[in-house]
Image (cartoon, helix red, strand yellow):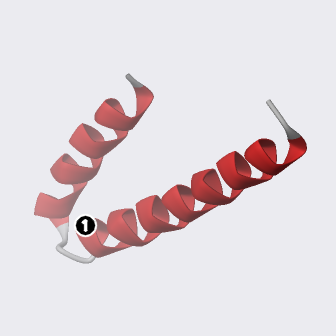
């Protein structure tokens, strides 16, 4: 893996992380129902 590839990988990981954080915030804003969605989401992310 070249340095450029590593940088690109890092950048896409950070973008994905930001998207994940905002998705979780959005789900949490749905209230108690959202918590269930977050649990599912986190479970999927951890697989």
Percent across and percent down for residue 4 are 82, 50
Which residue position is annotated with label 1? 27
On-image quarter of the C terminus? top left
Give the answer, above or below, for where 45 lies relative to 32. Answer: above
Residue occupying the point 26% across, 77% down? 29
| 28, 41: nearer the viewer | 41
Q: Residue furthest top?
A: 47
| 44, 33: nearer the viewer | 44
- In the picture, measured across the screen, residue 40 lies left or right of residue 5, that is left
Secondary structure of the residue carrying tag 1 is helix
Percent across and percent down for residue 9 are 67, 46
| 15, 29: nearer the viewer | 15
Percent across and percent down for residue 11 are 68, 59
Q: Residue furthest left?
A: 33
Give the answer, above or below, for where 25 lies relative to 38. Answer: below
Q: Residue furthest right?
A: 3
The image quarter containing residue 42 is top left
- In the picture, measured across the screen, residue 42 lies left or right of residue 1, that is left
Residue occupying the point 56% across, 64% down? 15
On-image quarter of the N terminus? top right
Percent across and percent down for residue 19 are 44, 66
Give the answer, above or below, for where 36 lies relative to 20. Answer: above
Residue occupying the point 88% across, 44% down? 3
- In the picture, measured across the screen, residue 3 lies left or right of residue 1, that is right
Residue occupying the point 78% across, 43% down? 6
Q: Residues within 10 Å of mark 1 (few under 14, many from 20)?
A: some
The image quarter containing residue 35 is bottom left
């Amino acid at each position: 893996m070249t340095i450029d590839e590593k940088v690109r990988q890092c950048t896409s990981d950070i973008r994905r992380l930001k998207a994940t954080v905002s998705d979780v915030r959005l789900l949490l804003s749905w209230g108690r129902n959202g918590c269930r969605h977050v649990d599912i989401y986190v479970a999927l992310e951890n697989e």
